[in-house]
Amino acid sequence: MLFSFVVSAALGYHITDLFETDSSFDEFESALDLIKREGFSGVELNLSFAEPGTLTKISEVIRRKKLRLAAVGTGLVYVRKRLSFTDADSTKRNKAIETVNGLIQFAGKEHAVAVIGMVRGNPTVDSNTMEFLHQSIIACDRTASEHKTQIALEAINRYETSLLNAASDVTKLIQDDGLHSTGILLDTFHMNIEESSIETSVRKNFEQISHFHIADSNRWPPGRGHLRVERLLKLLDEMGYNGWVSAEVLPKPDNPAAVADTANFLKRQGYMRQ
């Protein structure tokens, strides 16, 4: 397994207005220095744009810091831009797909996965909503296939979205739509809410896993809540998972402490060097 840490304007190492100002790029470089120093191999980003010049600058910084881009999240396309795959307005819906497709292409160039999470939106569920969702994800899956990369479609808890809450919901959509380049993203925080047994769900959906998020029950770093995250990592290890595991945690008590606490937890479990 490879371990990365999320840096974004939301969860993870939090940088306000990330990539929107020169000073935020300076903060990003400092964040990468810390992540590298603590022993992580990569970084995961959550972006709301697909502007080529800025994406190139981002990849250059990551490469210079001798880290890898593990995943490209797209949730901020909805959270910040209010664009979603299920918007009744076709113009907004198409803009959401266009932006996500741009990020999928970026992920492909960087040998990273593209995460589809909150960009699905949080609509009232009806037949139109489901049709919009299916067609949007099919379009993105096609782009992922063209650019030889993987989509990680996230199961997100019911309090954040009305769509695809449990791992079984995501797996069913992948199978029903015959998606070729889409797998599942399992997140311990969401699974703690939605799954009757997290371990059973990991086993049942293992073949579909293309990315994994860790956080404790309260979204703090592992070891700060009541989840036995070490058991889940051991299970993934035993089953032969060799993809990325990203820490998507709250910056509690602050950014440096969240990175250090997560790294120390992983070191105690023997996944990173002391």
Image: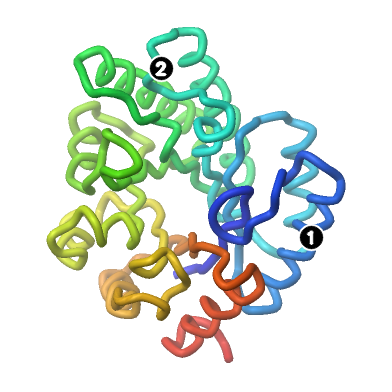
Q: Residues within 10 Å of mark 1 (few under 14, many from 20)?
A: some
Image quarter where the N terminus lies is: bottom left
* Residue kind at label 2, given as amino acid type: Asp
Q: Position of residue 2 (x, y in %)?
A: 50, 68
Q: Would you place residue 27 above or below residue 88 in this image?
A: below
Judged from the image, the secondary structure of the residue bearing numbered disc 2 is loop
Q: Residue furthest right?
A: 22
Residue 161 position in % (x across, y down): 32, 37
Residue nearest the viewer, comparing 272 with 129: 129
Q: Is residue 260 left or right of residue 213?
A: right
Q: Is 46 or 174 nearer to us in this picture?
A: 46
135 sits left or right of 100 in the view: left
Q: For residue 72, what is the image quadrant? A: top right
Q: Quadrant of the C terminus?
A: bottom right
In this rendering, position of residue 265 left or right of residue 23? left
Q: How is the image coloured?
A: rainbow
Residue tagged by mark 1?
29
Q: Which residue is mark 2?
A: 87
Instruction: State whether residue 197 is above or below residue 94.
Output: below
Label 2 – label 1 distance at C-alpha: 35 Å
Q: Is residue 166 left or right of residue 213?
A: left
Instruction: Decide which of 271, 35 is in the foreground and name it.
Output: 35
- Marks 2 & 1, CB-CB < 8 Å contact: no
Q: Residue 207 falls in which quadrant of the image? A: bottom left
Quadrant of residue 200 in the image?
bottom left
Residue type at tag 1: Glu
Q: Residue at x 50, y 31 (%)?
A: 78
In the rendered view, would you say 37 is above or below 61?
below
